[in-house]
Protein backbone atom coordinates (compact mmCIF):
# COMPACT_ATOMS: atom_id res chain seq x y z
CA UNK A 1 0.00 0.00 0.00
CA UNK A 2 1.39 3.42 -0.92
CA UNK A 3 -0.76 6.03 0.85
CA UNK A 4 1.27 9.15 0.17
CA UNK A 5 1.62 9.22 -3.63
CA UNK A 6 -1.90 7.90 -4.33
CA UNK A 7 -3.46 10.62 -2.22
CA UNK A 8 -2.06 13.35 -4.44
CA UNK A 9 -3.14 11.75 -7.69
CA UNK A 10 -1.39 11.61 -11.02
CA UNK A 11 -2.35 15.19 -11.94
CA UNK A 12 -1.06 16.87 -8.82
CA UNK A 13 0.60 20.22 -9.40
CA UNK A 14 3.39 19.25 -7.05
CA UNK A 15 3.86 19.24 -3.32
CA UNK A 16 2.02 21.76 -1.22
CA UNK A 17 4.07 24.34 0.60
CA UNK A 18 4.68 23.63 4.26
CA UNK A 19 4.35 27.37 4.89
CA UNK A 20 7.00 27.26 7.58
CA UNK A 21 10.71 27.51 8.18
CA UNK A 22 12.43 24.17 7.60
CA UNK A 23 12.67 22.24 10.84
CA UNK A 24 14.06 19.00 12.23
CA UNK A 25 11.47 16.21 12.24
CA UNK A 26 11.92 12.81 13.88
CA UNK A 27 9.82 10.10 12.21
CA UNK A 28 9.24 7.01 14.36
CA UNK A 29 7.74 4.32 12.13
CA UNK A 30 8.40 0.58 12.00
CA UNK A 31 7.00 0.17 8.48
CA UNK A 32 9.98 1.00 6.25
CA UNK A 33 7.84 1.90 3.23
CA UNK A 34 5.71 4.35 5.20
CA UNK A 35 8.80 5.84 6.88
CA UNK A 36 10.49 6.32 3.52
CA UNK A 37 7.47 8.02 1.95
CA UNK A 38 6.99 10.31 4.95
CA UNK A 39 10.67 11.22 4.92
CA UNK A 40 10.62 11.94 1.17
CA UNK A 41 7.54 14.16 1.46
CA UNK A 42 8.99 16.21 4.31
CA UNK A 43 12.47 16.51 2.80
CA UNK A 44 10.86 17.61 -0.48
CA UNK A 45 9.47 20.71 1.27
CA UNK A 46 12.76 21.46 3.01
CA UNK A 47 12.63 19.78 6.41
CA UNK A 48 15.57 17.84 7.86
CA UNK A 49 14.28 14.37 8.73
CA UNK A 50 15.69 11.48 10.73
CA UNK A 51 13.84 8.18 10.94
CA UNK A 52 13.81 5.60 13.71
CA UNK A 53 12.38 2.12 13.19
CA UNK A 54 11.58 1.64 16.88
CA UNK A 55 10.77 3.60 19.97
CA UNK A 56 14.06 2.62 21.59
CA UNK A 57 15.99 3.86 18.56
CA UNK A 58 14.15 7.19 18.64
CA UNK A 59 14.88 7.69 22.32
CA UNK A 60 18.55 6.80 21.83
CA UNK A 61 18.93 9.23 18.89
CA UNK A 62 17.79 12.07 21.14
CA UNK A 63 19.40 10.86 24.38
CA UNK A 64 22.88 10.64 22.86
CA UNK A 65 22.50 13.98 21.07
CA UNK A 66 22.68 12.68 17.49
CA UNK A 67 19.38 14.40 16.64
CA UNK A 68 17.42 17.13 18.39
CA UNK A 69 14.03 17.38 16.69
CA UNK A 70 11.62 20.30 16.67
CA UNK A 71 8.74 17.91 15.99
CA UNK A 72 8.09 14.17 16.33
CA UNK A 73 5.82 12.11 14.09
CA UNK A 74 5.29 8.68 15.64
CA UNK A 75 3.21 5.66 14.82
CA UNK A 76 0.89 4.70 17.66
CA UNK A 77 1.62 0.98 17.39
CA UNK A 78 5.30 0.11 17.29
CA UNK A 79 6.78 -3.30 17.97
CA UNK A 80 8.67 -2.29 21.12
CA UNK A 81 6.85 0.71 22.62
CA UNK A 82 3.62 2.53 21.97
CA UNK A 83 3.83 5.92 20.27
CA UNK A 84 2.57 7.46 23.50
CA UNK A 85 5.44 5.86 25.45
CA UNK A 86 7.86 7.23 22.87
CA UNK A 87 6.30 10.69 23.14
CA UNK A 88 6.47 10.64 26.94
CA UNK A 89 10.11 9.55 26.86
CA UNK A 90 11.02 12.23 24.35
CA UNK A 91 9.19 14.88 26.36
CA UNK A 92 11.29 13.94 29.40
CA UNK A 93 14.37 14.60 27.27
CA UNK A 94 12.94 17.59 25.37
CA UNK A 95 10.17 19.21 27.41
CA UNK A 96 7.49 20.74 25.23
CA UNK A 97 8.41 18.82 22.06
CA UNK A 98 5.45 18.76 19.68
CA UNK A 99 4.16 15.30 18.77
CA UNK A 100 1.94 14.04 15.96
CA UNK A 101 0.66 10.49 16.48
CA UNK A 102 -0.27 8.45 13.41
CA UNK A 103 -2.32 5.27 13.26
CA UNK A 104 -4.41 3.13 10.99
CA UNK A 105 -6.95 2.89 13.79
CA UNK A 106 -9.70 5.46 13.47
CA UNK A 107 -9.98 8.26 16.00
CA UNK A 108 -13.32 9.66 17.14
CA UNK A 109 -14.00 13.33 17.97
CA UNK A 110 -13.86 12.43 21.67
CA UNK A 111 -10.48 10.74 21.17
CA UNK A 112 -9.26 13.72 19.12
CA UNK A 113 -10.16 16.01 22.02
CA UNK A 114 -8.27 13.72 24.41
CA UNK A 115 -5.22 13.71 22.09
CA UNK A 116 -5.30 17.53 22.04
CA UNK A 117 -5.75 17.73 25.83
CA UNK A 118 -2.57 15.66 26.21
CA UNK A 119 -0.74 17.91 23.75
CA UNK A 120 -0.72 15.50 20.81
CA UNK A 121 -2.25 15.71 17.36
CA UNK A 122 -3.61 12.68 15.55
CA UNK A 123 -3.16 11.92 11.85
CA UNK A 124 -5.10 8.90 10.56
CA UNK A 125 -3.49 6.45 8.14
CA UNK A 126 -3.53 6.24 5.25
CA UNK A 127 -2.73 9.90 4.78
CA UNK A 128 -1.58 11.75 1.71
CA UNK A 129 1.46 13.96 1.30
CA UNK A 130 -0.70 17.08 1.34
CA UNK A 131 -2.35 16.17 4.68
CA UNK A 132 1.02 15.26 6.19
CA UNK A 133 2.75 18.44 5.05
CA UNK A 134 -0.15 20.65 6.12
CA UNK A 135 -0.30 19.05 9.59
CA UNK A 136 3.47 19.39 10.05
CA UNK A 137 3.32 22.99 8.80
CA UNK A 138 0.54 23.89 11.25
CA UNK A 139 2.39 22.31 14.19
CA UNK A 140 5.63 24.09 13.31
CA UNK A 141 3.92 27.47 12.79
CA UNK A 142 2.47 27.34 16.30
CA UNK A 143 5.86 26.59 17.86
Image (tube, rainbow, N blue to C red):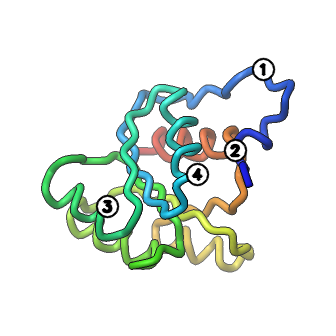
First in sequence: mark 2 vs mark 3: 2
The residue labelled by disc 2 is 4
Q: Residues within 10 Å of mark 1 (few under 14, many from 20)?
A: few
**Residue 90 x, y percent position in the rendering:** 29, 65
Q: Residue at x 41, y 61 (%)?
A: 53
Taking the image as shown, residue 104 lies to the left or right of residue 49, namely right
Mark 2 → mark 1, Cα distance in angstroms: 15 Å
The residue labelled by disc 4 is 33
Mark 2 → mark 3, Cα distance in angstroms: 23 Å
Instruction: Identify which residue, 139 or 15, lies in the foreground.
Output: 15
Quick one: SS at disc 4?
helix
Q: Residue at x 68, y 69 (%)?
A: 104
State the mark number for residue 13: 1
Mark 4 → mark 3, Cα distance in angstroms: 17 Å
Disc 2 versus disc 1: nearer the observer? 2
Q: Residue at x 41, y 56 (%)?
A: 98
Q: Is residue 126 above or below residue 70?
A: below
Q: Residues within 10 Å of mark 3 (few under 14, many from 20)?
A: many
Taking the image as shown, residue 62 lies to the left or right of residue 125, namely left
Q: Is residue 48 above or below residue 122?
A: above
Instruction: Identify which residue, 113 or 90, lies in the foreground.
Output: 90
First in sequence: mark 1 vs mark 4: 1
Quick one: SS at disc 3?
helix
First in sequence: mark 2 vs mark 1: 2
The residue labelled by disc 3 is 58
Mark 4 → mark 2, Cα distance in angstroms: 10 Å
State the mark number for residue 91: none
Q: Do the residues under discs 1 and 4 have CB atoms within 8 angstroms?
A: no
First in sequence: mark 4 vs mark 3: 4
- Where is the C terminus found, in terms of image quarters? top left
Residue most extreme to the left:
64
Amino acid sequence: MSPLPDAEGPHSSGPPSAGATPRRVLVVEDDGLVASMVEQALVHVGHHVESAASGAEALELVRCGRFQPDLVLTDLTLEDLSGIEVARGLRRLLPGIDVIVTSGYLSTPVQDAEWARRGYRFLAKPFGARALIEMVGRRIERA
